[in-house]
Image (tube, coloured by chain):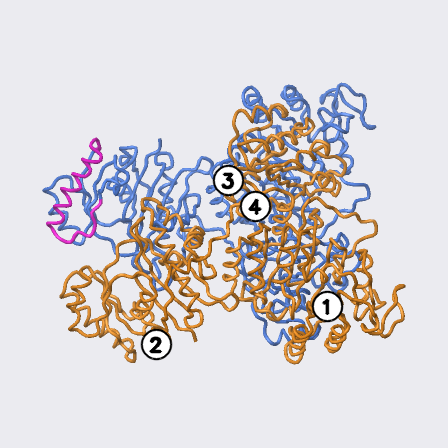
Chain colours: A orange, B blue
Amino acid sequence: MPHPLDTFFAPDSIALIGASRDQEKIPGRLLSMLRKNEYPGRIYPINPNYGDIDGLKCYKTIAEVGAPVDLAVVIIPARAVLGALEECAAAGVKNCVIISSGFAEEGGDSAAMQDKIVEIAKRTGMRISGPNAEGFMSEVQKVAATFSPTVDFKPGHVPLVATRRRVGIVAQSGGIGFAIKHRAKAIGVAISYVVSAGNESDLGAGEFMEYLVQDASTDVIMLFIEGIRDVEKFTAAARRAAEVGKPVIVTKVGRSGAGQRGAASHTASMAGWSAAYDAVFAKYGFIVSNDMDEAVAIAAVLASNPLPKGDRVAVLTVSGGAGIWGADTVSMQGLQVPALSEGIQSEIKKWMPSYGAAGNPVDVTAQGVSSGGLQKSIELFDASVEVDATLVIMSFSSETRMPFKESELKPVIAAQNKPVVCYSYTLPSDFARRELAKCGVVILTGLTHAGVAMRRLLDYSKFKLAPPADAAGLPARDLSAHLKAPTLSEADSKALLRDAGIALPDEVLVGERGALDAAIEKVGFPLVMKIQSPDIAHKSEVGGVWVNIMAKGEAFSAYRELLERAQKHRPNATIQGVLVSPMAKKGVEIIIGTLNDATFGPMVMVGLGGITTELFRDVTYRPAPVSAAEAEMMLGELKASPLLRGFRGVAKADVAALSKLISEVSMLAARLKESVSEIELNPVLVHGEGQGVTIVDALVVRAK
Amino acid sequence: MPHPLDTFFAPDSIALIGASRDQEKIPGRLLSMLRKNEYPGRIYPINPNYGDIDGLKCYKTIAEVGAPVDLAVVIIPARAVLGALEECAAAGVKNCVIISSGFAEEGGDSAAMQDKIVEIAKRTGMRISGPNAEGFMSEVQKVAATFSPTVDFKPGHVPLVATRRRVGIVAQSGGIGFAIKHRAKAIGVAISYVVSAGNESDLGAGEFMEYLVQDASTDVIMLFIEGIRDVEKFTAAARRAAEVGKPVIVTKVGRSGAGQRGAASHTASMAGWSAAYDAVFAKYGFIVSNDMDEAVAIAAVLASNPLPKGDRVAVLTVSGGAGIWGADTVSMQGLQVPALSEGIQSEIKKWMPSYGAAGNPVDVTAQGVSSGGLQKSIELFDASVEVDATLVIMSFSSETRMPFKESELKPVIAAQNKPVVCYSYTLPSDFARRELAKCGVVILTGLTHAGVAMRRLLDYSKFKLAPPADAAGLPARDLSAHLKAPTLSEADSKALLRDAGIALPDEVLVGERGALDAAIEKVGFPLVMKIQSPDIAHKSEVGGVWVNIMAKGEAFSAYRELLERAQKHRPNATIQGVLVSPMAKKGVEIIIGTLNDATFGPMVMVGLGGITTELFRDVTYRPAPVSAAEAEMMLGELKASPLLRGFRGVAKADVAALSKLISEVSMLAARLKESVSEIELNPVLVHGEGQGVTIVDALVVRAK
């Protein structure tokens, strides 16, 4: 199906605004790289100073071209860019890539120039990428619209292609985007596109990603993100990728304080809060990788293998030590390396010497290689019901000899039902890479990366897009009357939640001593009493909580004492009274929270409560709202989730009730995103299965 | 200083038992590799079938040589090996390497042959490496006594050497040992020795390591371990390495169940319990790495840099995106990337364009390269008091251009005071590697590995060998009378501990109802009562614990009830009575344990108690005994250690008292290693600073 950006990525004609004869400089390199990479369309160099460049007619202005131009690559000083863009638009140019720097990343007047670029794009409909971009490369249509040195190659260089499927790369750093391509191509991963996003005046990473999601020549997407600006396009593309089952591997940087400082001065982007990014990535089943070689290894394995159906790995090697290391590595990723049955072992033993090992790891030894045992084992595992994937661990350093015969291995790989991942413990020779590429096999050089890639493949194969939240689960009500203070007291917060339709224990706010008797009557012993004030956020800090009250006398002492303590510690606080609540049944302590992220909007968080968990930072986030099913997926991500599933004598908790509550709170946060900045339920006690949950304390913060 | 193994590693003469003319087979390769690598000593091929091989006289037997032989390399069928060894010993050969396979790794009669090898070594004093070994390579003395393909090279190959210092490798897998060398040399790390240990009939990994520790040409040691057999030599060498400050990077495999299965059938070694290995590694400050490229990166950085004095890193780049990624990566390792002062920023700004960034990450941009800004920045950071190390992040893919001038960078690196770690986000060209090697710089290609290496350097620089345990701290007493049952009851366990000199609360074991009054009198309310029986290990499972008893009546009910419950749940248990203890003050829950490891002997463990911690497996081990100082180091390793140091309103705990207790228990376990297999104190409550600890429950298990 045609796409509006087809003329960008596969232009029939390219104008080079600022073309130059000097190949030592970027403008000159752009032309020479376009031609060296055999761009098949028409090229129009534009520069008033030349009559021709390198045998091509050079035009004084874009208007002079007099023919349709799909793409203009702009590489002239920043101050001349706006004029050039107007001329391009007037000449009917469909798309521009602005390579020039000196805009938003410099701030001040330069940033104002970028605003004008946005305005031109909006007004004229011409699509604009950059400024401050490194351009893009289409390997499919041979468009090297970039000055990246990685699109250059030595004469006589034959590309190495091992994968049947292609990887497309969108990067908010040209240097990194093209470096990913450089590394991927070096191990034989076929590439569709690399596109650098630059300052994203008009076209952004989200829209580029959207293009790759719908692009038939792209099978796997890699993203390098500093901070997403076209958020709606990005999340729509992410959802679409999940729907069509196109895997996305993402690297998000600017996670640390120093990284955020760097991002601000780099492409003038705000790196944002990385937990929110991770929440969005998790929602759409993105594969997150923070290491380039690991990300490339995952892409390579995805581009050359079917997805696994289970977690059982056969480790196949000719080196005992390397096999053990391989078994450890995949085990460390939570994959199984099962002992093989006698039946399969006796098959394997036919082609290995007596000192080999068939147990898994399977060591066919060097002798097993000459007998063809390696490809036979791969074939055996591919057909076996005992394993779901094979990790082949070899030394591929030889420049002359191969442990496989192409004629035997190629059909096995061509018909593979399961992933076959190949790792060389020595550095592989170019000869070995090319020989295995003929069979469709990529050689990985990082064993940990191979193990991680196998794990991510399994995770991806199991990923399902969660069903949307059921809006009918929580009636829509006007709750604005509750938001009478910047921070609501516990009682006010709970009143809002109750009014919103969320179940809470029966509690009584006692504003005067005389009402205490009735409250006790209603709530019943044992009970808890808590001071209430919109000015006291942390009640325990002022001694404002009294638990396990068993008798009337104690309740009256508590009432007096709580008021006195509040008066002493916060003499200026507005005191609403004392909240009388039933003592909650025991349960697993959970914290549920919401907040509004500057990039992605409302988010819901869940974590295990209590001091130890705080220490281990065991929490997870999702964009709000979430359905109960998605909430349950969140709970599964917690390291401490076994506590909810029943662990060491602790009974299974009511995960269904907890998931329902998380969903309700998330819907509330999404609806109230304009008026509420934060909801925190802490703790929520999750009781045994079928026994529900108790919201013990709650806090609602009004939006500023 | 001369060393007995000098004649092994630097032999003046080598006999090849089983030499062959066929270079396609291993025996033939051994001779050709020795000569190709320019072995400078005398070579005596031994084979009754040839008169000469490749121009060298060939001897029928070793006896025929008639000259001293330092090393015999044995590569003949397994059944002929014993005879050959006897002949070697008779001829006065000093050392043998047995390459042949078919011994302990096969089991049965073949294993018995290996026992005979051990016997020959013991009887004759001839030192023997292997069988089933891949031999060794000395890069220093040009001895390639191995058939590893990695000692082969293309004609005209010029080795790449970037490091001033050398790395020595000991591997219990020849394939892996030589693969490590292959990867290390590829990035320019200078090697001293690689030695594969094989089945370790006589010479083992521990003794080889000991050689490298004392060897002046080895500055960094890399170990690949499946399971240590010469344990005493290994730990002595480990201690010596720590004392002389020679870093050891270790990979231990056989950590998973499948890995252990693999190790058993590989070199017939028991992979053992990896937690014990990690405990020994931690004691001696080993750098543990489970990934080959990571381990090589750490070795490369150690071999080419001084140790850092602090954790502050300057990230220096020409690519904004890569700089942000670098800042994130080192931050994720717990290193600091501090914002730089105005002073240093204004210095840097002199050599970068306006769109560069001087804040850290420092992006001098491509333009900053041409102005020489990169080496100037490196020099500036090396002299600055604001950072402790520099991470340089560049693209080194060009085959023709370098961002540094050798004449300018070389003196900076030669005079460096701080680590300078260099990473290329594109794959570096051979040209770039060689140019930077001239300056003494290794280019790393894994950013995560670079970050990990910087972290490990810092950790290593801070490591101090712990002082030994103070035996006088716990008087030596005969405790054998206490070990009257396979598993001691709590009361009996505590009696043993008390007798050993460990402080415990005053408690009374009440064997008959009439004694309860006196016990209450002595202990005082509130108190705890617990059923006591050597047959009931888990008291709470039978409802055998009653806490918070406040009154006499309750105590008497508890007494009766506890006995009834025990009778009901364990009718055959021998009941000693009920232990009456004071309710312990609040404290942080800790577990202390000891056990005897099959490889390394007694071990002490400490961890945070309670259910959450069990979930996070937050425990640490050390070989027993430990001093209080070493125990405190253990506590520092716990993820939850902030809980002891004061966290979120929890007061600082009495770490000194806890450390003293751990030390005492460890000394006890070490002394009783023949008679006690396990001691467990769980929980131990650690009170506020200066308020000591309380051992709440204790269990002693007799050795079988």
Occupied quadrant, residue B64 = top right
* Chain of the residue where label 2 is placed in the rendered structure: A
2 and 4 marks on the same chain: yes
Q: Is residue A334 visible?
A: yes
Label 4 is placed on what type of residue? Leu
- Mark 1 crowdedness (10 Å alpha carbons): few <14, some 14-19, many ≥20: many
* Residue labelled with disc 2: A484
Q: CA distance from mark 2 to mark 4?
A: 50 Å
From the viewer's perspective, is the residue at label 3 or at label 4 nearer?
A: 4
Label 2 is placed on what type of residue? Lys
* Residue labelled with disc 3: B255
In the image: residue A614, left or right of residue B196: left
* Residue labelled with disc 1: A96
Q: Residue at x 18, y 61 (%)?
A: A524
* Residue labelled with disc 4: A457
Residue B547 magenta-drawn?
yes
Q: Secondary structure at mark 4?
A: helix
3 and 4 marks on the same chain: no
In the rendered view, would you say A179 is above or below B577? below
Q: Is residue B127 visible?
A: no
Sequence-first tag of 2 and 1: 1
Label 3 is placed on what type of residue? Arg
From the viewer's perspective, is the residue at label 2 or at label 4 nearer?
A: 2
| Segment colored magenta | B545-573
Q: Secondary structure at mark 1?
A: strand
Image quarter (top left, top right, bottom left or bottom right) of the C terminus of chain A: bottom left
Q: Residue at x 29, y 80 (%)?
A: A572
